[in-house]
Structures are given as C-alpha cells and as structure tokens.
Amino acid sequence: MSRQRIVLTALWLLTLVSLAVRVWRASTISGSYDEEIDSLVYLSQRWLQGGLLYQESYLRQWPIVQLLYAPAAWLGSIQAHRILVMGLNLLGGVLLASAVRKFSRAGLIQLGPKSLVPLASGVLLVILSQKIPGGIAGSPHQFANTFLVLGVYMLGRGLPGARELHGRRAWLVATGAMGMMAVACFFTLIYPLTLVSVLVLVHHRQPGRAAGALAGGAVLATALMFLPYLFVADGASHAWAGAVALPLQWISQQIWREADVGFLFGELIRTPLAGLPLWLLALMPAAGVVLIARKTWNAPGRRRERLLLVPGLAVVFLLELTWSFQRTDFNGHDGQLVVVPVVLFLASGMAALERSGRPAVRRAAFSGTLILSLILFNNMFIAEVFGAPSRLSSRVIALEQDRTMLRTYLASLPAENRGFTAPQDPALQWQLNVPATTVGIGPDWSLNPQGMKASWATTVIGLPVGAAQTCAQLLKPANAHLVWKRVDPEGPNTEAFMRQCLSQEPGRWEELTQDLGLRTGEFKLFRRQGDPISGSAPSGLTRSSARQDPR
C-alpha cells in the first residue's frame, strides 16, 4: 500500500472513530434532539404492546416507523437508538462501497486499479449521515437513506457486466421494494425516485419487464407493511384513512409558501458539514464529471455516455427533490435526504479524476482530497475526542429538571392512579410506559391536529377537530393527571385552553405545579380530586385551585 493510501485511510478511519465518540457522548435529554423522536418511540412502544398505528394513535407517518423505532422503545434508550443508527450508517457505507465497485464492473463508474474511491464513498456516506444537521438524532430521514443505499446496492447486484444495462429480475424486485420502504419513511422521496426510475428504465434493454419488476417490489413492500391491518377489526378502513386519506387531506389544506426552487437548492448545497458547506466537497468531483462530459462529447458510440448515467441521475434526483420541497414543509433536517445522490455524484467525479491521463490532474485531486480530509479530521476528531461535550441550553436543563420531578411523582403513584396524558410531551408517556388518551401524538397532532377539518378520515381515526372533541379526549376517565407544557402562544396548546377544558368538571381538578416544585413555568400538573396519592409521593403537596388565572 502506498504512503498516500495509508495517510488518507488513517485519516478517514480516525474520523469515523470521532463519530462514534460523538454518539456516545451526546446528551439524551429530551429537548436536546428532534422532539419527533419521542413521538416515534412512543408509537413503537404501543406497537410492542399490540397497538397498531392509526388504531389508537396517529402521526403523519406510515406503519414502518413502529418497527424501525421498536429497538429504542424496547430498550427505553435514546442512546441505544443512536448507536443502532450509527451501525446502520456503517453498514450503508460498506454496501455503497460495494455498489460503486459493481457499477465499475458494469461500466458506469471508471475506477482505477486499487482505487480509493469505493472506500472514500463509504466513509463519506457515514460522515454525511451523522454530521448533516439532525443526523445524530436518528430521524426517519436516516432510515430512508438506509433503504436508498440498499436499493442502490441491489441494483448494482443486478448489473451483469458492461455489455448491457439490465439486471436479473429478483434484484430489480428487491430494488423496487427498498425504494418503497424509503418512500414509506419519507413520502417526499416518491417524486425523485419515480423520475429516476423512469430514466433508468429508458436505458434498460427490456424496459417493460424491468418496470414490472420494480413495481412488483414496491407493491410487495406495501403489502407487507399493511398486512397486520387485515387481522384487526376495521383494519382496512383505518389503514386507508391514516396512510392515504388523512395525508391527502392535510396536503390539500396547506397553504404552501411556494419558495423559489433556486433558493431551496441553494439551501441544500449550503448544508453545513463539520464547518464546511456541502458545495465545497463537490467542487473537485464536479470537475471530474466535466471531464467525463468532454470525453463523451468527443468520443463516438455510446460507451462513454454510460459514465454520465450515475452523476446525471444523481443531479436529476437532487433537482426533483428540491422541486418537491417547494410544496412541503421544508426544514433544515430535510438536508439529510441529499446524502446518497451526493455521494454517488462525488464517486463518479473522483473516479474520473483518479483515472485522468494527466499526472497534474491526479496530483491536484490527491492534494485536494488530503486537504479536505485534514479539515474534517481537525473539525471532527480533535473536537469530539479532545474537546469538551457541547453544553446544553439552560432552558433544556431546567425543563429536564421539571420533567424528572414529574417522572418521580407519577412513577410513585399506585398503578390505578398512574394514568395521565402529556399531549405536548410524549417523552413522559414513553419513559413511564403509560398510554396517552389523545389520538394525535406530539404537540402538532394531539390538541391541534394541523387544523384538520372534519371528514370521514378524521372520524375513522378519531382525530379531534374541535374544542369539544379535544376536551373529551383530555378528560377521559383513564386520566388521573394531566401534564401541560408550553408550546404555542395560541390555539388548543395554550394553558388557557387546558383550563377551559378542566372547567367542564367544576371542582374536580387541582393544580400541583407549585406544590411539586416545578420552577420553569413551562410545565403544569393537574390532578383529579379524589384520586389518592401514594405515600412515597413527594411530601408537602397541597391542593391549589386549577381555576387560577392562566399565564
């Protein structure tokens, strides 16, 4: 092994070590990560106890999420979930490196002898997956990327060689299934995946048979996801209402901001990565793609055109993804979805530079790669291994202190009096393993389900569409306590609305906020009068009126 290969490989492996250290040291306090994770862990906890999504709970996700977050729910650990996601990223890196080699054998990527491009591709996939904002949390984006990598790998397995671009039917079926799984994790992917699939079929020797295989795989994956609903009462109607009707209704009721496509694309390519913008990593590979394009233009025949398929489809995927974000609620974490196409684009471009006939180009490519690797090494390994862990905000720490007091109090109660609902804080629900009485899970769906209007779907699922239905879910007999958390300045999530609901049972509810010692003012605890407190509950709890003036 040459000295250059040893240096680069060592830097990359040490960078991966820094990612593992980062995962191990990261805070697991609720509020220090994407709060949607708490809702997903809660849903998986209910699934482990026999509760299917859409039957008793709702979140705008497909049922696959209950399986994906089941390990975290079973272990009761956010850290375990992050370690699992890190493991999936490493597996994805290995599979993508293998796929790049298979694409090379099929004539789609031009790798040199003993090329470092496959290893670099796998390492870069892990780095991007973990370091793009939101990556460490282990959101559904991560699982979507894992299924995309599996799809790319299986497509590569189906490529028999450089003579013809078609694969064996079974691998195409598996590719379609993985693509559908990715869509189930993040539905916006249906647009770029559909367009890329059509373009792949155009270059297939037997497009009809290939299309049937891809569609068959997608149908098979969908059938497996919804199979359990056939064995429960009204399962089919619940599945249709939750997976299809309600999302379509939600889309139809949104007022899209119609952001400029160029602006959104700029947001994606400026995604920060360990102190570097994403576009900076793409500069050298883009030069390699330009070299491929020049050779293709000057060379007769279609052989060299094949080298533009992978980077070309990656760019098409990114542009279509950007266009689809134009009509959805785009946020910074959605940048994670660019990981797989970006890595494939970089692999194609770097392979072209590595195989360049000009020594100066090869030396420049190595120098650029070394400089970027050193920057990432410094910003990640030095910072994560030798630096102090990032400090949490004082608000997050204070909220966790209040949450700890709430957990201690509620856990100390007899089982018959432990029922409670915390509509804006699903972390409490899964940490204490107590089912909520609101159908919608999390602050966006529990008390104010996205402003949804009454429909057949909301009736089937049981989503509240007015103050009366919302209060009815909060005041169910199973709730001996209610926990309110400050989220929105107006609407059903306000303290005033909570007290309005409690006033429907005059004299029955008492507030224990001050008596329990909750200091932030962000949490309020209410208890139904007449429900006994266990002897191990915090001492000094007295009754105070739940009808005091709201904040």
Image: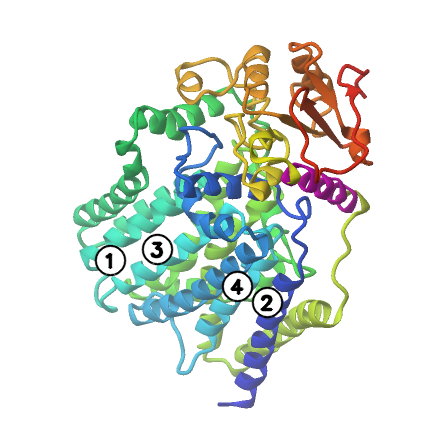
Q: Position of residue 487 (x, y in %)?
A: 70, 30
The numbered mark at residue 126 is 4
Q: How many C-alpha atoms fall within 10 Å of the one at disc 1: few (<14), some, or many (≥20)? A: many
* Mark drawn on residue 151: 3
Of 505 and 137, nearer the camera is 505
Residue at left 72%, top 68%?
Answer: 383
**Label 2 Cα neighbours within 10 Å, binned few <14 / some 14-19 / many ≥20:** some
Residues in magenta, as a range: 396-411
Would residue 518 be visible to someone looking at this image? Answer: no
Residue drawn 55% across the image and 19% down it: 476
Q: Does residue 407 belong to the magenta stretch?
A: yes
Which SS does the magenta portion mostly show?
helix
Q: CA distance from mark 1 to mark 2?
A: 33 Å
Q: Which image quarter: residue 506? A: top right
Please indicate whether residue 307 sits to the left or right of residue 332 in the image: left
Where residue 176 appears, x then y in whole percent? 29, 49
| Amino acid at pointer 1 | Trp
Crowding around mark 4 (Cα neighbors within 10 Å: few <14, some 14 to 19, many 20+) is many
- Residue at the disc numbered 1: 171
Looking at the image, residue 539 lies above or below residue 311: above
Type of the residue with mark 2: Ala
Circle 2 residue: 20
User: Which of these two is toward me, 213 or 519?
Assistant: 519
Which residue is found at the position 43% from the left and 24% from the top? 246
Mark 2 and mark 4: span between their CA atoms?
Answer: 11 Å
Up/down of 194 relative to 533, above or below: below
301 left or right of 137? left
The alpha-carbon separation of the residues under discs 4 and 3 comes to 17 Å
Q: Secondary structure at mark 3?
A: helix
